[in-house]
Image (cartoon, helix red, strand yellow):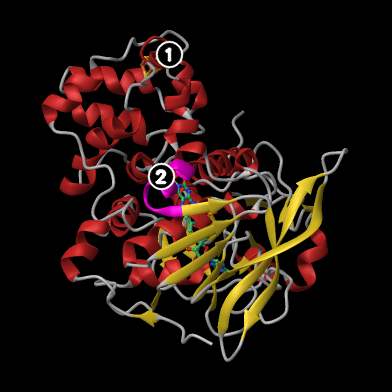
């Protein structure tokens, strides 16, 4: 049996720094002006309709043309307070840029993402203040979770004159912006720059290492606060349902990515020579590409259905493939091959039956692996609500909310990854937080 080939520092510090540098470097002023000139300033702009936060895209691009960068940033951030992060991480190819009419004639949309970054970067770099708080209402809202949904909600509540207290599990705020997003999408500690700028509005208290279900109960929060917003994301990970999942070398992709994001040099991370990733979503793509960039020689992703059914977009699949990752479809893992640690995975081919249901063919094959990453989805962690669990309407293990992001409890709202139907994107989590804050405001301060 060959020994597992796992090493730290497979690549030189220079190679690591190159591999994890900014994926889409910012535009210079001339580049931004040329790109802004490509916009047709469409009436009823399809790009705005396609943006989950409804940013008035032609309006912000127009302001770039007249060199009104602060005004442009305001147009973006008033709809999406994380417009800086979203400019870096949004899958624009399936949102605003997919809808851009420039695709029709030129097969190339206006580069909305990079223009958005051009407008918003100075705000964070220079700490520009764009929003003021309304007169204090005396109302206090508990926000559980300091990721995109929680921060967006707290900021909008603060702008509306309410006080918000964020209770957060992790040591740093930002949620998956800080612990999940691929390192080359958000460099130079941008997540924390954005968090401090958001908190600068005032009226937002942060209580770190305060975990709902451990240090806090929903009952207590409902007693002490005028309303509660739940945005604790998905702290649990799905399993493969196979024996030996706890074997050495079988890792959860999200845990490894969190370590990678917190590692300054990335020289301390164990990197396998041959890596197998199981899953077909954004997390699977991210762990596969980052493994390659850490120096893994062979990285193979295996997904049980075809390319069209993958959670990762065509662009992301192509990005992985051009980064040296090979993607195999129509196979599911049936056995983790283990000696004193994992040595490989046995797969069984799959296909669709006449009713379109997935079935196994009985045809088996296997891959060697020094490390196997599980990236088959996440779920709400453990017992967060205790006795209050049955008070919530839930579906698919997530919280059910209405259009205003209100749960089945009159004073409790929820948003982000923990709600049913969420598409697991930063931008949608931000929108949830904003919509919920506006709804909480109407509930606490009804207009005559
Ligand atoms: C690996 C990975 C890569 C991704 N890449 C992208 C991408 O490129 N682009 C994109 O748009 N989206 C991406 N996403 C999805 C995106 O990050 C999430 O949809 C988004 O962060 C959800 O925001 P949230 O606020 O709901 O939850 P989270 O970001 O998960 O934040 C939850 C917060 O709640 C806190 N918390 C958790 N449990 C408790 C508790 N019990 N009590 C108190 N606080 C608690 C945590 O500390 C955390 O701060 C990625 C996700 C993953 C996993
Ligand atoms: S669809 Fe494209 S061209 Fe039209 S307003 Fe939006 S960015 Fe400009």
From the top left corner, tell me how far across and down residue 310 is, in percent.
61, 45
For residue 33, which quarter of the picture? top left
Whether residue 279 is situated above or below residue 310 in the rendered picture:
below
- Start-end of magenta stretch: 316-325
Whether residue 121 is situated above or below residue 294 in the rendered picture:
above
**Circle 2 sits in a helix, a strand or a loop, which is it?**
helix
What number is the disc on residue 319?
A: 2
From the top left corner, tell me how far across and down residue 187 is, in percent.
26, 55
From the top left corner, tell me how far across and down residue 8 is, in percent.
32, 80
Camera-nearest residue between 332 and 146: 332
Camera-nearest residue between 387 and 89: 89
Are the residues at dot 2 and dot 1 in contact (C-beta closer than 8 Å)? no
What number is the disc on residue 195?
A: none
Residue ID for mark 1: 101
Query: Residue 122: within the magenta?
Result: no
What residue is shown at x 16% (from left), y 46% (from top)?
Answer: 126
What residue is shown at x 52% (from left), y 80% (from top)?
Answer: 249
The quadrant of the image that shows the N terminus is bottom right
Say whether mark 1 is within 8 Å of ligand 2: yes
């Amino acid at each position: 049996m060959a020994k597992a080939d796992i090493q730290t520092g497979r690549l030189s510090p220079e190679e690591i720094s190159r591999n994890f540098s900014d994926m889409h470097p910012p535009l210079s002023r001339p580049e931004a002006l040329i790109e802004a000139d490509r916009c047709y300033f469409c009436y009823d702009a399809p790009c705005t309709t396609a943006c989950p936060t409804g940013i008035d895209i032609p309006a912000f691009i127009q302001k770039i043309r007249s060199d009104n960068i602060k005004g442009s940033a305001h147009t973006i951030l008033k709809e999406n307070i994380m417009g800086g992060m979203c400019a870096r991480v949004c899958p624009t190819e399936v949102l605003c840029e997919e809808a851009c009419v420039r695709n029709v004639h030129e097969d190339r949309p206006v580069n909305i993402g990079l223009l958005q970054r051009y407008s918003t970067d100075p705000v964070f770099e220079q700490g520009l203040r764009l929003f003021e708080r309304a007169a204090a209402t005396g109302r206090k809202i508990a926000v559980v979770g300091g990721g995109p949904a929680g921060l967006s909600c707290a900021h909008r509540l603060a702008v509306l004159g309410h006080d918000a207290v964020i209770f957060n599990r992790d040591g740093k705020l930002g949620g998956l912006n800080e612990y999940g997003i691929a390192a080359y999408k958000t460099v130079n500690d941008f997540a924390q720059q954005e968090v401090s700028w958001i908190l600068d509005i005032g009226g937002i208290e942060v209580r770190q290492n305060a975990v709902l279900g451990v240090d806090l109960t929903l009952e207590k929060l409902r007693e002490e606060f005028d309303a509660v917003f739940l945005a604790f994301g998905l702290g649990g990970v799905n399993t493969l349902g196979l024996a030996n999942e706890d074997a050495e070398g079988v890792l959860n992709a999200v845990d490894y990515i969190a370590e990678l994001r917190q590692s300054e040099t990335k020289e301390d991370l164990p990197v396998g020579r041959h890596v197998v990733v199981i899953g077909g979503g954004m997390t699977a793509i991210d762990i596969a590409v980052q493994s390659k960039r850490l120096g893994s020689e062979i990285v193979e992703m295996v997904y049980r259905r075809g390319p069209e059914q993958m959670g990762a977009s065509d662009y992301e699949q192509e990005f992985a493939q051009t980064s040296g990752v090979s993607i195999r479809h129509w196979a599911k893992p049936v056995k983790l091959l283990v000696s004193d640690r994992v040595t490989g995975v046995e797969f069984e081919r799959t296909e669709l039956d006449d009713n379109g249901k997935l079935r196994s063919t009985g045809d088996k094959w296997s891959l060697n692996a020094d490390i196997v990453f599980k990236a088959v989805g996440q779920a709400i962690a453990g017992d967060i609500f205790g006795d209050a669990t049955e008070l919530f309407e839930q579906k698919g293990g997530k919280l059910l909310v209405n259009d205003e992001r209100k749960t089945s409890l009159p004073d409790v709202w929820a948003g982000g990854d923990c709600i049913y139907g969420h598409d697991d994107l930063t931008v949608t989590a931000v929108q949830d937080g904003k919509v919920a804050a506006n709804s909480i405001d109407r509930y606490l301060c009804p207009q005559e």
